[in-house]
Amino acid sequence: MQASLFGPEPVELPDATLDYFPEAYDRAQADELLAQLMTQLHWRQDRICLYGKKVNIPRLQAWYGDSSANYRYSGLTMQPRPWLPVLEAIKLRCERLADCRFNSVLANLYRDGNDAMGWHSDDEPELGSRPVIASVSFGAERGFDLRHKKTGQKVRLPLAHGSVLIMRGDTQKCWQHGMARTKKITSPRVNLTFRWIHSVE
Ligand SMILES: O=C(O)CCC(=O)C(=O)O
Ligand SMILES: [Fe+2]
């Protein structure tokens, strides 16, 4: 497969390094990959403890990677599922675009505009100090919100069907990101974030 025809488009923000490839995949490829990811991934409903109550998180998730890429989450050690061919192919494309390697991917399925992700940084110790994260989007275009931790500056990047956003440098240290609910969206979106997990003892 050829590399992206367009981009990267650098997104100029203080204390962040972002490269956006709006058409890493063309429309036909992106349609096909969306269908494969929706049907092939082992989507599950995770629950978190909120004010002492177990509640469903507002999206479905799946975790794949090398068997060594364990990570700890709320006191549990999570084992990734072994790679699927569709994920390995997308991983390779991201490794070429980002010029680095990934050993795991967190997949999120936003079934419609009611599904969302709260403000956070991808700053777990397993990710190291200046992680490179490649975020691939298929399906409904949703607004990816960024908020500077010190200045409060806010930006919304609409992430297109078939796009790749690469976050690196101080992006996680200085910014939070999230995805708000929206009544306007009634169709699904799949997002894959490729990461390198270091083993932490
Ligand atoms: O769905 C997105 O675009 C963001 C996903 C995300 O922030 C994450 O998986 O950590
Ligand atoms: Fe994130």
Image: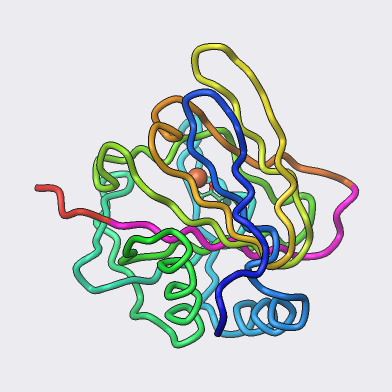
- Give the colour scheme shown: rainbow
Q: Position of residue 18 (x, y in %)?
A: 53, 42
For the point 75% across and 50% down, the residue is: 142
**Which sits in the foreground, 122 or 157?**
157
Please say if 15 is above or below 22: above
**Which sits in the foreground, 53 or 149?**
149
Q: Residue furthest right?
A: 184
Q: Position of residue 157 (x, y in %)?
A: 70, 41
For the point 50% across and 13% down, the residue is: 150
Left or right for 33, reference 199: right
Q: Quadrant of residue 36?
A: bottom right
For the point 32% across and 48% down, the residue is: 73
Q: Quadrant of residue 6?
A: bottom right
Please say if 57 is above or below 33: above
Q: In the rendered structure, which segment of residues is drawn in magenta? A: 184-196
Q: Position of residue 176 (x, y in %)?
A: 52, 31
Q: Is residue 131 magenta?
A: no
Q: Position of residue 37 (x, y in %)?
A: 60, 78
Q: How many marks?
A: 0
Please say if 180 is above or below 198: above
* Quadrant including the N terminus: bottom right
Left or right for 174, reference 177: left
For the point 33% across and 80% down, the residue is: 82
Left or right for 73, reference 113: left
Q: Quadrant of residue 146?
A: top right
Q: Residue furthest top?
A: 151
